[in-house]
Image (cartoon, helix red, strand yellow):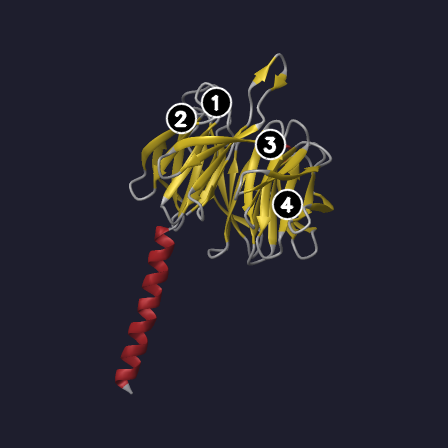
Amino acid sequence: MKAKKVLFLTLFLSVIFIAHAYAGDKRVYVTNAGNGTVSVIDASANKVVNTIRVGVWPAGITIDPAAKKAYVVNSNEGDSTVSVIDIDSNSITASIKVGAGPMSMVVDPDTGIGYAADTEHIVEGKNLNKTLSVIDLKTNKVTGKIGVGIGPFDMKILDKKIYVSNTGDWTVSVVNTADHKVLTTIKVADTPLGIAVHPEKKKVYVAIHGKGTVSVIDAASNKETGVIPVGKAAWYIAIDPVKNRAYVSRREDNKISVIDTNTDKVIDTIDPGKEPIGVAVDPAGNRLYVANHGDVSVAVVDTATNKVIDKISLSPSTDSTYSGSPWGVAVY
């Protein structure tokens, strides 16, 4: 009996140790647009543990966990690169030149291809950009372009299709990852910004900035099936497929709308801080991370209660007189 108790205690402590080690390894990466850096946050302590210098005006960030790489999109038109970060060493391993004014990138781990949205190149008041840059992630080289709508802003992949929000012509392009052809174009009510997908429910959620709504697209038919009112100036969306929740940042009224993806109804509102933009969910840790552009912080939200449980202050901009800084956020 005593031996069994010792064995049980040993196993119990081992589980606690593993869980603690896992929590200690969890990191949150935040792009600081105003000063050209990425803050690395230890999620167990909610403390910044590293700062990585990237390019000019870093915005979108995506992580390939299998390759242990983070891709940071530097959106300043004079820069227009993607910084590749090795997660183990937190060092820059490559800089990829893409189209002008990029805002986001998505990685297809099945094919080893990345896609950067060539978002903005204004000439005489008109945005001339209508492409995605196709990147071979083994060589970190752009191998081609895909024609989409005007001003592609955000992207997500679902069922071998890339869903792209086009800010300039109020559409969503659906691109086949196999041949890089546009399968269809979906018209929406106003300027689309952030996109998120629910892999189990086969739904695509699009933040309609100008209307303060979220469009719901059925990924099987590629048809809009609903519109969810959320509030002023919807920006980005993050999905928790475990809890069936979508979190929508509303920059101009300093809120996060919480949507039940079973009913596609708003069920709660979170006050994260000033000018929330980037949002990222850690389903395993029951956490939502919100990049507050206006007060230079990251809000940590308990997704069980939808309450802010911590706020992490970041360094204010030193390279720019622009007051805001944090933009994109990703969890590894």
Q: Nearer the viewer, residue 204 or 301?
A: 204
Specify which label sits upstream in the sequence, 3 or 1. 1
From this view, report whether residue 2 is shown above or below residue 135. Answer: below
Cα gap from disc 3 to disc 2, whole angstroms? 26 Å
Answer yes or no: do the residues labelled 1 and 2 have beta carbons within 8 Å?
yes
Check contact, mark 2 vs mark 4: CB within 8 A: no
Instruction: Point out the tag, 3 or 2, that comes first from the N-terminus.
Output: 2
Q: Which residue is mark 3?
A: 148
Mark 1 — residue? 76
Q: Residues within 10 Å of mark 3 (few under 14, many from 20)?
A: many
Residue for badge 4: 205
- Expressed as whole percent of the image width and height from the top left, the position of residue 284 reads 47, 57
**Which element type, helix, strand or loop, lies under badge 2?**
loop
Cα gap from disc 1 to disc 2, whole angstroms: 8 Å
Q: Which residue is mark 2?
A: 55
Residues 131 and 293: in front is 131
What's under tag 1, amino acid-wise? Asn
Disc 2 to disc 4, C-alpha distance: 29 Å
> Image point 27% across, 85% down: which residue?
2
Q: Secondary structure at mark 4?
A: strand
- The 10 Å Cα crowd at callout 2, few under 14, some 14 to 19, many 20 or more, is many
**Is 105 in front, or is 137?**
137
Q: Tell me the kind of residue under disc 3.
A: Val
The amino acid marked with disc number 4 is Tyr
Secondary structure at numbered mark 1: loop
- Mark sitting earlier along the chain (2/4): 2
**Mark nearer the viewer, 3 or 2:** 3
Residue 236, quarter of the rendered image: top right
Foreground disc of the pair 4, 3? 3
**What's the CA distance linking mark 4 and mark 3?**
19 Å
Q: Earlier in the sequence, mark 1 or mark 2?
A: 2
Residue 228 appears at what percent x and percent y? Answer: 72, 45
